Image (tube, rainbow, N blue to C red):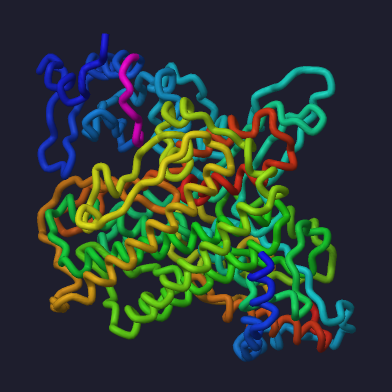
Amino acid sequence: MWKLIARNLLTAPVTEPPPPVSREALVELAAQVDKAARARLGRSLSIRQIDAGSCNGCELEIHALNNPFYDIERFGIRFVASPRHADVLLVTGPVTANMAEALQRTYAATPDPKWVVATGDCALDGGLFAGSYAVVGGVSAVVPVDLHIRGCPPSPTQLLSGLLALLEHVERGGVPR
Amino acid sequence: MAAPALGEWIQNLPGTNWEAVPAHRPVPRHVFDAAAWNDLIAMLAVADWELFGLWGDDDTIHVAVRDPGDGLLVVLSHPCPDKSFQSLGHVRPGAIRLERAAADLHALISFDGPDRRPWLDHGRWERSRLFASAPYPFLPVDGDGVHQIPVGPVHAGIIEPGHFRFHCNGETVVRLEVRLGYVHKGVETLMAGQPAFDAVKLAGRISGDSTVAYALAFSRAVEAASGAAVPARAVELRALMAELERLANHFGDVGAIANDAAFALLHAECGRLRELILRAAERCFGHRLMMDRIVPGGVAVDLDTGGADALAELVDELAVRLRHVVDIYNAKPSLLDRTTNTGIISAELVQRFAAGGFVGRAASRDFDARKQPGYPPYDALAFEVPVRRYGDVHSRVTIRVEEIDQSLGLVRQLLERLAGPAARTELRATLPAGSGEGLALVEGFRGDVLAWVRLGGDARVIRAHLRDPSWFQWPLIEAAIEGNIVADFPLCNKSVNGSYSGHDL
């Protein structure tokens, strides 16, 4: 173990510079700023992830945000265990009929102000699963969505640039819709 | 009296009670009338034949049964025009949840089933059965000081949804009951009527961590049904992707298990190694998880020389770093104390449920679909299937580490073969127009994925069924946790790592 720690101390960290903030996401978010509300959160965001029906591909890439290459916590973004502690709900999957109520209840349990980020192509409109008897649709079919991050699944870099855009937006005093 | 072999027993059934179905490849399918079905249940009570799957199809219930003696796998189909059939659940407990799913999805009812509560149906579909929306009756526990801990479907961590109902006495778990079905997306209904080339995309999204295994299983079933011959290079590229997927998942999970024992160093190191594999996959095949790279008839991408070199380098690095990981793991008594003797899944249970993957192999069940029934190119590659006996978390970690070693060897062999005289003319065969039925068994990182497809003449899927290895692993977690403390549940659960989406379909 000491060898590994020593080597990691002696070599440069593998953590990479942040990706550029997603312009696309900024545009989507900017459209939602009505009045300049005060940023209450400072430079930090707590995220509660909700799988509302995904194939778990998105979860794998969200997990990767915590690995040493992306190290999401350096930006003040961290994943929390309870919606009570969350500013952001990061929702994946086409919303299944069996998860719709759980998603609604989690949204209701999250204190204001809160933002919802729909993650992955399925979260946008149900993706390949749209039209199934067991699928309600995209995340916006159940709760209001502030930002979509596309991809099947979105890569950690795409996720990071979308979340950084949200962080920037919040810092400028953007409010959720 | 020793039970006869499965094949022999079928041949000796009265000819009026069963008939063989033509054009079901590569294993036989037989139609069993009620008498033969009855006999099958009686035989299962005495024989060691394993249940590999059970699924509904209009008015027919199909089971896949395997004789571990000679490895014969057959599909037995029982027409039930009155929508009811005699349950296999009393003799093969692995059938119970599958029968409940068949009732939910096809209204095929096992009239004497040991458990007839709804399973995937939570009463929220238009087609839901009437009583499915009633509160789910969890199995009761009585006793002084027994209390319940309900967890999920939304639970802490970045994880799929499922509900865990713990009955505890103090810290000790008296009973755990798992309720699943939250991520049921109706995949099989969506597949029906789709061209095989579209349906394979859905197959690759049944369980994202096993996208390669699923796309491969589905494609192999389609190829078996239509009689397509896959080009040799494509066969090797498929195996290369499958082994990379196995490596990425095993590394990720070994780290996650250490993390659940609060040992962050290994989590960071393993997460880093997993990331290196995903980046190599992106570099070589254009997608980090290798989604949509395997298609019926072959593969969608080739490996270039630069990619092959990058993989060769990666494998060497992983082999070295794996040793560090193992040395650290073995030198930490506080970590070993958490994994050893925790979450024991007995060999007997594993046999009864025919649990595959590292869950089975950590408890004496020497089964790996790459060896038995086997499929190319594995018949031409040298590798071993590690097996342990004790069935605790530590055994499952050890199996995974040993499997990483084997997969690294397989990647090396595959790279060597792919570098040979490049017959890189063809990566994908066109599917012959023939219709038929096909079955495939593919070893994913989690265990054997079973795919069954009925194909129409225009390469359209008439009916497809995919059975995740988790079906036979989830029930065992309930046994593994009994008598353990609540705090060890994450560790036990992660060491099994059942798929929610793969199970829920």
Quarter where residue A65 is shown = bottom right
Q: Is residue B300 above or below residue B146?
A: below
Relative to residue A17, is residue B295 drawn left or right?
Answer: left
Q: Position of residue A142 (x, y in %)?
A: 64, 60
Q: Residue at x 78, y 74 (%)?
A: A45
Q: Is residue B13 left or right of residue B39?
A: left
Residue A111 lies, with reference to residue B387, above or below; the image says below
Q: What residue do we see at 35% from left, 30% from top?
A: B51
The verdict on residue B52 being magenta is yes
Name the residue rendered at 58%, 44% in the picture.
Answer: B394
Percent of width and height locating residue B478:
60, 33
Q: Quadrant of the C terminus of chain A?
A: bottom right
Q: Which residues are magenta?
A: B46-55
State which quarter of the image contains the N terminus of chain A: bottom right
Tell how many labels: 0
Counting from the top left corner in percent of width and height, residue A80 is at: 76, 62
Q: Residue at x 69, y 22 (%)?
A: B140
Does residue B361 show up magenta in the picture?
no
Q: Is residue A77 above or below residue B97?
A: below
Task: Give percent across and percent down for residue A127.
Answer: 47, 66
Our reading of the magenta stretch's main secondary structure is strand
Residue B74 in view of the camera: no
Front in this rendered view, residue A116 or A14: A14
